[in-house]
Amino acid sequence: MENILFDRFVEYGRKVVAEKDELIYRPRDLQRKNCAYYLETGIVALATITKEGEEKVYLYFNSGRLIGFTQLLMEVNKREGISWNRKIGHAEIFIIARSKCVLYQLRDRDFKRLMESDAVFNRQVLHVVTENYVELLDHFQQALEESAGTRLCRLLLECYKERNGVKVVPKSMTFLEMSRYLGTHPVTVSRIVAALKKKGCISKENGYVVIKDEERLMELIMSGEEIKQ
């Protein structure tokens, strides 16, 4: 399928670069709030801050994803008379770069115009909304039903990149970062990683976590086996 989203963002938007840990979207920041972004390269996190002041990550988005557009889409719906009833308060969700990112920024007026006039663009945005919704449901279901070890195995398989035939986990995916996503302590992540190394599933090479046995990691996920050091 032709990537109309990327083509339109390149045509009507502007290229921006976000450094690691740079805030890309925050609802109270009007300059960032009134834009949608196409992530060409890099990794970003969809996160929030808990009442205790800790960062909690809900999803990671890799290259080729549309981000920061939800508020614009809600405004289009309100203009059409579609709105949520009795929605008391909203969590402040923000998007932050977890690596150096290259994005294309589209202003709200152009996004809304394309939603109204370009049927293919509209359809692909709807596809992205559905994909994000399903991913969030999966994340919450796994958090409720699976152990931290099982979810860590899943995270490793979902985030690795192939470099010269080697499957490596990005350095931005630190133990602290993993713990934010899993809702556990970094020490717990360290222990699970050590156990996976003993099982021969992963190794540490040149500062990278390397996937050595993808099939075994899948078996651990499917079996729900408790992973202990």
Image (spheres, rainbow, N blue to C red):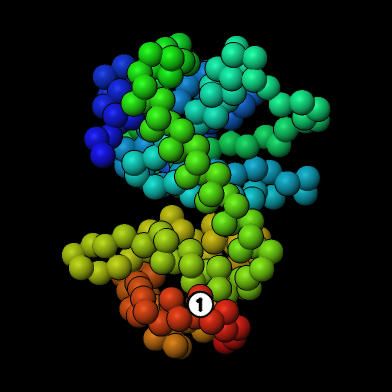
Relative placement, left or right, of 198 versus 49 is: left
Residue in the image at 34% along x and 26% along y: 120
Task: Tell me where residue 34 appears, x and y as whole percent.
Answer: 52, 18
The part of the image, by quadrant, that contains residue 4 is top left
Is 92 in front, or is 8?
Answer: 8
Q: Which residue is mark 1?
A: 222
Amino acid type at mark 1: Met
136 relative to 30, above or below: below
Relative placement, left or right, of 48 versus 36 is: right
Q: Is residue 138 visible?
A: yes
Q: Quadrant of the C terminus?
A: bottom right
Task: Tell me where residue 47 appears, x and y as whole percent.
Answer: 59, 44
Task: Tell me where residue 132 appears, x and y as whole percent.
Answer: 51, 44
Is 69 in front, or is 15?
Answer: 69
Residue in the image at 45% along x and 88% along y: 198
Q: Quadrant of the N terminus?
A: top left
Q: Is residue 110 visible?
A: no
Number of labels in the image equals: 1
Residue in the image at 50% along x and 37% along y: 129
Badge 1: how crowded within 10 Å, few (<14), some, or many (20+)?
few
195 relative to 89, above or below: below
Task: State the SS at label 1.
Answer: helix
Residue in the image at 77% along x and 29% along y: 87
155 relative to 75, above or below: below
Task: Tell me where residue 134 appears, x and y as whole percent.
Answer: 53, 49
